[in-house]
Image (spheres, rainbow, N blue to C red):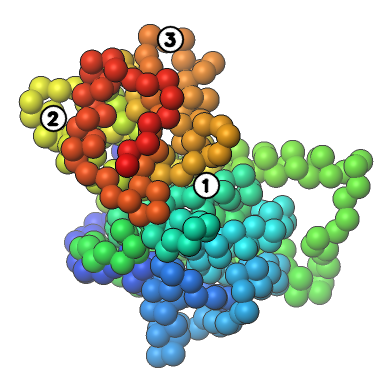
Amino acid sequence: MKNIKVEKNISNMVKRESLTGGATAAKALRQINPDVMPVYPITPQTTIISTFAKFEAEKVVDTEIITMESEHSVMSACIGASTAGARTVTATSSQGLALMNEMLYIASGMRLPIMLLVSARALSAPLNIHGDHSDVMGARDTGWIQIFSENAQEVYDNTLMGMKLTEKSNVPVMVIMDGFITSHSVETLSTLSDEMVKNFVGKYQPDLSLLDVKNPITYGSLALPNTYFEFKIDQEKAMQDVAGHYRNVAYDFEKISGRFHDFFESYYAEDAEYVIVVAGSTAGIIKDVVDDLRKNGKKVGLLKIKLFRPFPHQEIASIFSKTKNIAVLDRAMSFGTNPPLYSEIINSMSGRNTRHDFRVASYVYGLGGRNIFQKDIVKIFESMEIGSLSKETIYIK
């Protein structure tokens, strides 16, 4: 990591607050002051838009909130607003994200800088309103940046960084928190002053706008076989460039906050013999277990994924130089094949690391909001230590 000069007197420009994850996201949006926010409420995302709607009603933001008839219409309105040059945000969960699916591809294909806050939730059927990662993993190949948040502090930081990142890269971004576990839990966090946020995010100046009549453009034109392929290659190149943009945004954010957000967080993973890989709020439980086991001389660690799309394969492979065994915890399933995060870790290790003397085990947990406990994490570390790792996916029920 580079040596970053943190802004002087930063303690005078931060505030300690106790907020839910949803309220935290709304506060960050208030400080960003977007132009347009199309909305349709769905549990457990509702706290984000209801809190932000209060800001709009009190006239502390200039945002145009548009109530739509469905999430499909929400993303359609986001696309229209963004092509017109407006700074555009929205939020959703679960079936709402699934209903947006058609339009997600259009937003990314048009390279529109839209930010979508997601309170990750289980998908029907059967009906379940509690948190897991089924919805966001179902959207992982739609061409959107995906950033996971462990807690309210990361929700706040990622929302501010996400807005700047999408506008720098012209790739839409999802900022993800765990439904209910993070979205509805009250946590204490540090927030920045409105002026600091305003300067960090900056004034949005789109490169292209449908309303710029002096420079007419076309969005959504027809591409036949002789051109469509090239569009998709350009889109992939833009996604690969996101990693560099993300790092620059993270360095800029560290200067004003003192907090650096890399592609992932290594919690004692560099020298660990046994490492668990996870994304989202469960990282907090695993950190407590790692602390306890480290006191007993166990070389264990955690690798917490933050940037899931684009996935930092090469950087992750370099972390496991001393690792004997790895356990990957997924809060989602990919029916008929390997779970999503497990697949990415396997891909990271294959062809990018010459070591073959370790095992990578797959665990699925927490579907439909099912709790996972410290004893479950301890058992996973014990299995890695004795080499008792299943070749099949284990379900932590």
Query: What residue type is disc 2 on?
Result: Leu
Residue 293 badge: 2
In the image, residue 131 sits, relative to residue 232, either above or below, namely below
In the orientation shown, which residue stands out farthest toward the front?
Answer: 126
Residue 356 badge: 3
Q: Which mark sits nearer the N-terminus, 3 or 2?
A: 2
In the orientation shown, which residue stands out farthest toward the bottom?
Answer: 58
Q: Classify mark 2: residues with Cα within 10 Å, few (<14), some (14-19) or many (20+).
A: some
Q: Nearer the viewer, residue 248 or 360?
A: 360
Residue at horizontal 58%, vertical 82%? Answer: 66
Q: Which mark sits nearer the N-terminus, 1 or 3?
A: 1
In the image, residue 187 sits, relative to residue 338, either above or below, namely below
Q: Secondary structure at mark 1?
A: helix
Mark 3 to mark 2: distance in Å? Answer: 26 Å
Q: Nearer the viewer, residue 125 or 286?
A: 125
Query: What residue type is disc 1 on?
Result: Met
Q: Which mark sits nearer the N-terminus, 2 or 1?
A: 1
Residue linked to disc 1:
137
In the image, residue 183 sits, relative to residue 306, either above or below, namely below
Q: Is residue 344 visible?
A: no
Q: Nearer the viewer, residue 141 or 204?
A: 141
